[in-house]
């Protein structure tokens, strides 16, 4: 198949090589002329992936239209903040090809899930989300990775499953779009908190508690929005949470770690050098939880640290001194 990939960062590059290795005709878009020239001349992607070379069959473009012209499928490999504008570019092209989105987040301001943004802008294009524990750095090296694909119409999820399946890339099908999107977006918040905990010098006990109670918060919001509880026990829930909270590949963990060590959030983002989805997702999730009246104490404290200048150590102390309660209280809004 002919696949157009919009976005030439670490994830877009890794997926491009995967699809090319499978045997698809792959075209990839970058808006950066220097990156375009580098790929054309050297074939690598410094600043995003180390020891990486694009498959020679991949064609790189500076035009969205050229990238997706006649494509059987379109992969969105851009940060959450660029999803709307990228979808608008696809809409202007007139393409009705299935869209596979890799971003994990909530839209700022509207707090929409990205499938909801797609319904607004690309109502006639089948929408699929690919999610799960999948660092681009490992996918690029063809290390064993397992993900899932989800679509409202199962035939498109099955189509995407066949599209991406490879000997090192196992793909499951899911049918809970809300749960998959909420799990993928909110795990970045908890990973940020895990990095902050490590930056403060706390141990494995603290991080294990943070991840476990963080999963409770993810479930709480997801179920309130209509997700299935079991989804959060799968790849886009606990699976993605584990990999993002425990790996130095995680931008969210690195960002939180810097903040925990005393770095200002803006300076920490600059040091990471790439988009940190959890930073803006914390704000969107905090605002959404307030609108819905959902209790999310970890998210609230991280919001205080990132947006109100609260002391990270004091935020942890506040969480530890919350009133005693039953472990399962309010997980399922009963």
Image (cartoon, rainbow, N blue to C red):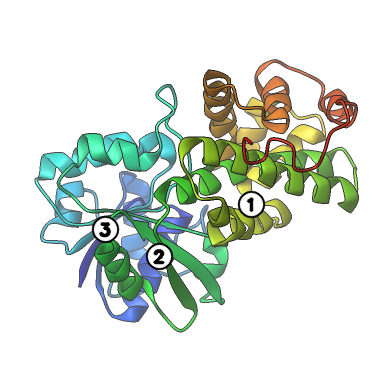
Nearest the camera: 188 or 158? 158
Identify the residue under disc 3: 153
Looking at the rendered structure, the number of numbered marks drawn on it comes to 3
> Which residue is at 52% across, 70% downward?
146
Nearest the camera: 18 or 297? 297
Identify the residue under disc 1: 250
Report the residue that reaches farthest toward the front.
334
Q: Is residue 265 left or right of residue 81?
A: right
Do the residues under discs 2 and 1 have CB atoms within 8 angstroms?
A: no
C-alpha distance separating marks 2 and 1: 17 Å
Identify the residue under disc 2: 15
Label 1 Cα crowd, 10 Å radius (few <14 / some 14-19 / many 20+):
many
Label 3 Cα crowd, 10 Å radius (few <14 / some 14-19 / many 20+):
few
Say which label, 1 or 3, has the lower sequence index: 3
Q: Is residue 305 left or right of residue 18?
A: right
Res. 261 mark = none
Can you say which quadrant of the picture contains the C terminus?
top right
Give the foreground label among 2 and 3: 3
Q: Position of residue 196 (x, y in %)?
A: 77, 38
> Which residue is at 66% across, 38% downward?
217
Q: Quadrant of residue 123?
A: top left
Give the foreground label among 1 and 3: 3
Can you say which quadrant of the picture contains the N terminus?
bottom left
Q: Position of residue 215 (x, y in %)?
A: 67, 46
Q: Position of residue 98 (x, y in %)?
A: 22, 57
> Which residue is at 49% across, 48% downward?
179
C-alpha distance separating marks 2 and 3: 23 Å
């Amino acid at each position: 198949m002919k696949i157009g990939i919009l976005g030439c960062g670490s994830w877009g590059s890794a997926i491009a090589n995967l699809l090319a290795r499978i045997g698809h005709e792959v075209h990839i878009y970058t808006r950066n002329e220097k990156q375009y020239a580098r790929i054309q001349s050297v074939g690598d992607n410094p600043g995003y992936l180390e020891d990486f070379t694009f498959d020679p069959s991949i064609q790189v473009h500076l035009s969205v239209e050229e990238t997706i012209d006649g494509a059987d499928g379109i992969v969105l490999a851009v940060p959450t903040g660029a999803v709307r504008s990228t979808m608008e570019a696809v809409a202007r092209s007139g393409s009705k090809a299935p869209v596979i989105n890799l971003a994990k987040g909530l839209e700022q301001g509207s707090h929409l899930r990205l499938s909801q943004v797609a319904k607004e802008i690309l109502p006639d294009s089948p929408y699929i989300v690919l999610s799960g524990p999948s660092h681009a750095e490992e996918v690029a090296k063809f290390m064993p990775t397992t993900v899932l694909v989800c679509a409202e119409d199962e035939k498109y999820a099955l189509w995407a499953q066949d599209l991406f399946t490879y000997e090192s890339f196992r793909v499951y099908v899911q049918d809970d779009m809300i749960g998959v999107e909420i799990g993928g977006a909110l795990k970045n918040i908890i990973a940020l908190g895990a990095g902050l905990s490590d930056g403060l010098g706390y141990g494995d006990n603290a991080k294990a508690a943070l991840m476990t109670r963080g999963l409770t918060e993810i479930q709480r919001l997801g179920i309130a929005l209509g997700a299935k509880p079991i989804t959060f026990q799968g790849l886009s829930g606990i699976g993605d949470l584990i990999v993002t909270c425990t790996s130095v590949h995680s931008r969210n963990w690195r960002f939180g770690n810097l903040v925990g060590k005393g770095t200002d959030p803006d300076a920490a983002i600059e040091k990471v050098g790439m988009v940190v989805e959890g930073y803006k997702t914390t704000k969107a999730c905090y605002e959404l939880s307030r609108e819905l009246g959902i209790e999310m104490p970890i998210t609230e404290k991280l919001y205080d640290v990132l947006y109100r200048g609260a002391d990270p150590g004091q935020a942890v102390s506040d969480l530890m001194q919350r009133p005693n309660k039953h472990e399962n209280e309010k997980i399922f809004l009963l």
